Image: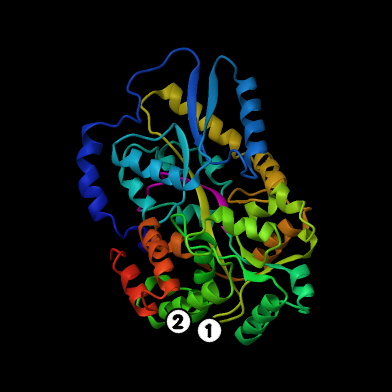
């Protein structure tokens, strides 16, 4: 996928290169004295399932380093606003914080061209870097530069509430598309909306996951290298229109991730899609159907079967600095945060999956299903956002409502999205 990360650089770099050369507010040119405060712009706060463990680890680190280093979490609970903040800061020649995370994709890969970000290949200790998953490290290394480290990884399966299926007289997950349509009709007849879909936010998250499954099944593991006008994408768009129009909730058009997840949590929908972090939510565990949830793919829409949709969910970055004490403090905290025993603590409390090697095996049965599925499947492909970047995904989201409402055709939908791909 390294080739994909090099796409779409020209516009951003031409506009930003002069800024990067003229000033870099994310760096420190002089040595600091006294306690060093490190700002961490963190999305792992609030309702995020990783928040309690992350907060505890930061507090423990600060207590052990009192008077020397203090990590200050700057909460970023709105994921979409946070991603925009990162892009705006980098374009303005400023590192958004001393420590922050990105979703590594063709859009954020442009950040690697900036000297604002620390190059871990130059400052990281070899023993520490080898604790990260080697494949994820390769994906995170662009042209020999390692300006981010893989932290959170994910597979994005489809979730099935088997209690809801039972109420509709269905005993198993559908294995063919015809079975799926039949099951959808049975769920509707039982008063249950078959799927949680959405066309809002900046990425139409749950529907984007469904679309990715369909596109890969129809077009193969390397579908993302093809033009978006490829027949596989057009067919996937056609199927998504039907699923959202006929087999989701009435408010799906314009709905955000909170609404899509809320319908599933309330038992109003039978089928959902999300990553392993969602499996660790307290409100999910408190639902009466929690123990019935099964995860899998969707029935094969095409010739590609037995695969998972996966991504690097969060890569960690640090602001470059000429202050040797600040650099040492940043690296010391990151080494502490990514210790296998500390990553294990975050995994145990949240269900999230990480690119740091641990001996963690989930006790939570739903979380364990993610590990079992990942370990039992040999083929994987990125989702649309991970493969093509946030600009393309935003266009996907903006045109998805028009597709569902019938103001554009599947062919037109795909042409509009394709126009945003910078090749």
Residue found farthest to the bottom: 178
- Determine if the magenta segment contains residue 110: no
Residue situated in front as seen by the camera: 252 or 178: 252
Can you say whether 242 is above or below 37 in the image?
below
Q: Which residue is mark 1?
A: 302
**Range shown magenta:** 143-154
For the C terminus, the image quarter is bottom left
Q: Which residue is mark 2?
A: 235
Can you say whether 179 is above or below 61 in the image?
below
Q: Is residue 327 left or right of residue 93?
A: right
Quadrant hosting residue 49 = top right
Q: Is residue 140 left or right of residue 340?
A: left
Which residue shows up at 52% across the image and 63% down it? 198
Closer to the N terminus: mark 2 or mark 1? 2
Closer to the observer: label 2 or label 1? 2
Q: Is residue 311 left or right of residue 29?
A: right
């Amino acid at each position: 996928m390294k080739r994909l990360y090099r796409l779409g650089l020209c516009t951003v770099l031409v506009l930003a290169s002069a800024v990067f050369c003229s000033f870099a507010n994310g760096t420190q040119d002089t040595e600091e004295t006294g306690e060093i405060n490190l700002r961490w712009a963190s999305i792992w706060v609030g309702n995020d399932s990783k928040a309690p463990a992350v907060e505890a680890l930061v507090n423990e680190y600060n207590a052990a380093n009192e008077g020397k280093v203090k990590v200050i979490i700057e909460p970023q609970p709105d994921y979409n606003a946070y991603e925009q903040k990162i892009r705006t800061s980098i374009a303005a020649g400023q590192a958004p914080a001393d420590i922050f995370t990105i979703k590594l994709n063709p859009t954020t890969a442009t950040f690697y061209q900036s000297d604002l970000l620390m190059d871990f290949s130059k400052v990281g200790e070899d023993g520490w870097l080898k604790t990260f998953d080697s494949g994820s490290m390769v994906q995170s290394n662009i042209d020999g530069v390692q300006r981010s480290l893989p932290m959170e990884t994910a597979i994005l399966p489809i979730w099935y509430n088997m209690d809801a299926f039972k109420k509709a007289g269905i005993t198993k997950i559908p294995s063919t598309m015809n079975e799926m349509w039949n099951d959808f009709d049975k769920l509707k007849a039982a008063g249950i909306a078959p799927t949680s879909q959405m066309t809002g936010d900046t990425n139409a998250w749950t529907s984007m996951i469904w679309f990715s499954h369909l596109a890969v099944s129809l077009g193969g593991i390397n579908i993302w290298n093809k033009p978006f006008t490829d027949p596989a994408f057009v067919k996937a768009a056609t199927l998504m229109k039907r699923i959202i129009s006929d087999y989701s909730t009435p408010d799906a058009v314009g709905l955000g991730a909170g609404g899509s997840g809320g319908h599933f949590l309330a038992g109003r929908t039978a089928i959902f899609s999300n990553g392993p972090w969602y499996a660790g939510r307290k409100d999910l565990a408190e639902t009466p159907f929690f123990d019935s949830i099964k995860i899998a793919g969707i029935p094969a829409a095409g010739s590609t079967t037995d695969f998972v949709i996966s991504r690097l969910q969060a890569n960690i970055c640090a602001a470059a600095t000429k202050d040797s004490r600040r650099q040492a403090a940043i690296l010391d905290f990151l080494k502490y945060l990514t210790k296998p025993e500390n990553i294990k603590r975050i995994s145990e409390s949240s269900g999230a999956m990480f690119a740091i090697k641990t001996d963690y095996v989930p006790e939570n049965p739903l979380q364990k299903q993610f590990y079992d599925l990942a370990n039992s499947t040999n083929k994987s492909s990125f989702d649309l956002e991970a493969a093509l970047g946030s600009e393309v995904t935003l266009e996907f989201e903006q045109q998805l409502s028009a597709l569902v409402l019938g103001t554009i055709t599947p062919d037109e939908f795909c042409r509009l999205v394709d126009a945003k791909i910078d090749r």
